[in-house]
Structures are given as structure tokens and as C-alpha cells.
Image (spheres, rainbow, N blue to C red):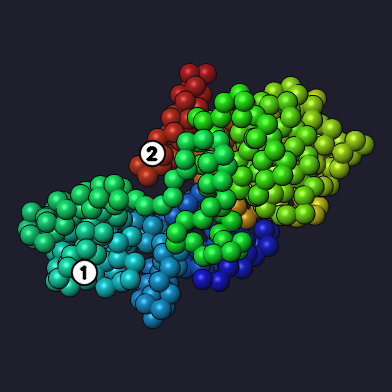
Amino acid sequence: MFEPVIAPSASLVGLLQRGRGDGQLHALAADRTEAIAALESCVTHDPRADWQVENRSLYYARLYMELEAPLAGIEAHLRSPEDVLDQDEARTGLALSVLGHLAAYGRRDALDLLRGYTATGWNWAWALDELALRDDDRSLLSLAPAVLGRFPAGPEGDAELRAAVRGAYEPRPWRLWAAHHPRIAAASEQSPFDLWQRQMNRGGVTPGWSTADVLAWADQQEPADPAGPGRDPVAAARRAAAAARCLAAVVRPEDRPAVLDAARNGAPGARGAALRHLVDRNDPAAAGLIEAAAADVDERIVTAALEVLGRMRGPEALAHARRWADPATGGADSALGEAAVQLLADAGEPADGPLVVDALRRWISVRGTDGAGLATLVDGAGRLAAAAAVPALRHVYGETVSSELRGRAARALAATDPHFAEGPAVECLWDCEESTRELAARHVTTTGDVRVLERLRRLAADPAEEAEVHAAVRVRLTSRERH
């Protein structure tokens, strides 16, 4: 799939793509046809960079209900020829999740679309999981022949059926069907044994039980890996981390020179494993070895050193981090300096706030309002109560395309911005992330804006809302009634 095109944050589409509370408020005030078109574009072209950490489905479903929007756009998307050509769950997953919420709200057309797609669509398993939570037994039983027909009789089809049963997020339909269809009953019984057998038969190379064996193993490749240095860097990093855990079990005091040598001169895997072991043991040599590795010409070694730096803790580690992060003594704009600021954001003290705020501003200036490292700086500004970060945090809150990062910015603002309760917290009550709505419910000022109490009451009455949000809302409503 192509990366979604994200509209400017001030536009209706841009607000809805980001899942901001103002998106819902603007959509309800806009021309209905325009609002529905913007909503459909978001649901049929998932704007999220990572659907596993960002929520949108309930947010969009609520807006469908508010606008009384038809489902023709979603139906055309699901029945498009691309459903067969583009077999990526991300193409249809958001639309199916929105239909699931709409079915829970009582939309019969959403329920019918899910049933039809389960019978004929490529991503039928996702649709079935949505139905498992909302449909009645009789309707689910009527879908069994269509689903079972996807698995031809024979060993290959039976294996695929067992995999489908094993991979189901919601087992309810399969349990219902097992009582009426012997093939499904057999697949349900065999599936756990298949998993057990795979776990027992796992192959691969394992290290010997000496420090030298583990360090050598850290740079070996799995039998199925392609030969040569171009192997998967993620797999290599996982092996180095596993080797570091093994070192914790086998390294003896007399092995320290060998570990130090590996951390100074070893191959990338062994060097990364040795550095991590030394950091986890608070070895006094770790900081100097990390500094040397961060200046290496091999990018793999540099990456390993910077990742390990984030595991450092304690007063001495923070002292090194301050030296590396300070423009006067280190290099704030170097990779080592940036990693050091990340450590200060994560584990530093209030006096480290200015360094974190400077790094946050520099990140936004150079890289914009997204990126994995930005979240740590945002969290750090809030944890250190750095009031100087408020303008930067507001900018991240408004501009980032990640609703997960926006939630972090909102939490940081709650700790640093004296106007959060009557400002951003009001919008956050409509946010797509339940954790952000919960934060808003706990902080928002309930006087002065007539929308706030109405929204709190609607959240309290909505059965689709998360329990944590319900609890926060009810505490606020109850405390207000007492006063």
C-alpha cells in the first residue's frame, strides 16, 4: 500500500486524519456532504502509520452516527477489485473495525455489510472477529458453509483450516460451528497440538556454555539466513540481545578481560552483546567503550552503542550523558549527544530540563513533529515539569500525525501548561485515543464551557467507551454534583 497523504492540520480532512477532537467538532459544524466525504476518505485510506498503537475506529464510528452518514463509501471500498489484488489487512481493517462499532451502536446496515464481507471478502477473518462480538448465534451459524468452503478438503486445506482456527482473535464462531461441522471440530482439537509440536521442533543454532562460545554465537547466522554481511539487521540485533542475556549466566570474574576486548574490538554482534552486558552490570568501563563505539565507522556498531546507552542508569551514567549532551563539552547535534539527551529525558533530574527542552526544539526545527525519538523528549519534558517546553509541546500536539504521540504531548502539557485544563483538555474529550480522553476527563475545567458537561455526560452514557474513561468521567460528574 502507498503511504497516506496527510492533509494540513488546519483542514477538516487533516484534523480527522489525525483523530483530533477538533476534527469531530469541525465536521459537525461543516457542510454535511463535505464532512461525510472527508470521513469516508479517512476510513477507506487509513491515515495511521501504525494501526497497532493508534486508535481511530470508535472515533470515526461516532462521527458516522452523529452525521447519520450512509455506508455506501465503505461498501464500495470493501467490494472493490482491489480487495483481491491488494491482500494487505491495512487496506480494509479500519473500515471493518468502524463497521463493528456501528453494528454495536445498532446500525443494521453495518451488520449486513460485515456478514456479506465475511462470506465473500479477502479479509474475512477480521470481519468475522467483529461479528463474533456483536452478532447472534443463528446468523453466525449461517456463515459457516461460506467460511468452510474456503478450505478445500484434503491435508493442505485441513492445515489451513487449523491455522485459521488457531489465529482467530475471537473463538466464539468456531466454537459454535464445531458443534455442527466435524471438520471444524477436528481442526479445533488438532490446532493446539500443532502449536505445541512447532514449539518443540524449533531449530536453530544455540550457543555453547562459555563466554567465548556466546560471543562467537552472537555473530553467527541462522541456517536459513542469507550468507554474507547483508543479513537482516533486526535479526542481528535480536541475536546480540539474546547473547547479552546468555552472558549474564556464563560470565565469571576472570572472563571480564575477554568481555572488555569484545566490547572494544569485537565483530558487530559480539561487540553489541558485550557492551550491553557491561552496561547491565554497571561496569565502570562501559561509558568509555560506548563513546568509542559511537565514533566507529561501522554503522552497525554505532547503532548498537547508541541503543545500549539508553539502558544506562545511575549518577555516573547521568554525569556522562550531561557531558555528551552539553554543546560546550560534547556534541548536542551528534548522534552520541542526541542519544545522551534521550537518556536525560528518560532518567534525568529537573536540572536537566533545559537540555531536554533545547533538544526538543532542535528536533522540531530539523525533523518536524514525528519520529520515534521525539516521544522520549516529549515524555521527558513532562516528567521534568519543564515549563519552557510548553510552546514546543503545543506545536507537537497540534501538528503530529500520530495520535499516540499527541496523547503523550497532552500528558506533558497537563504537567507543564497552567492553561491545559481550560484549553487543550476540552478538545481532548473528543480525541480518538481513550487514554487522551481519560486524561482530559481528569483535568478539564467543568465551568465556563457549556460543551464540557454535555460531553462528559455523553461519554458516561456511551456503552462503547472504555472502562477507564467511564471511571474518570463519573468521578468528575459525581464530585461536581457534591459541590
Residue found at x 16% / y 57%:
187
Query: Whole-percent x and y of residue 409?
Result: 65, 41
Left or right relative to 73: residue 309? right
Which residue of the protein is positioned furthest toward the right in this rendering? 328
Graded by Cα atoms within 10 Å as few (under 14), some (14 to 19) or many (20 or more), the crowding at tag 2 reads: few
Of callouts 1 and 2, the N-terminal one: 1
Q: Nearer the viewer, residue 273 or 148?
A: 273
User: Which residue position is annotated with label 1?
Assistant: 156
Q: In the image, what residue occupies the spot 68% across and 62% down?
A: 8
Who's the residue at 44% across and 50% down the image? 205
Q: How many residues crowd around disc 1 within 10 Å: few (fewer than 14), some, or many (20 or more)?
A: few
Residue type at the position of mark 2 = Ala
Furthest-bottom residue in this view:
81
Mark 1 lies on a secondary structure that is: helix
Residue 428 visible in the snapshot: no
Residue 461 has which mark? 2
Residue 186: image location, x then y, percent: 11, 56
Coordinates of residue 305 in the picture (x, y in percent): 70, 43
Q: Give the residue drawn at x 30%, y 61%.
A: 125
C-alpha separation, residue under disc 1 versus residue under disc 2: 49 Å
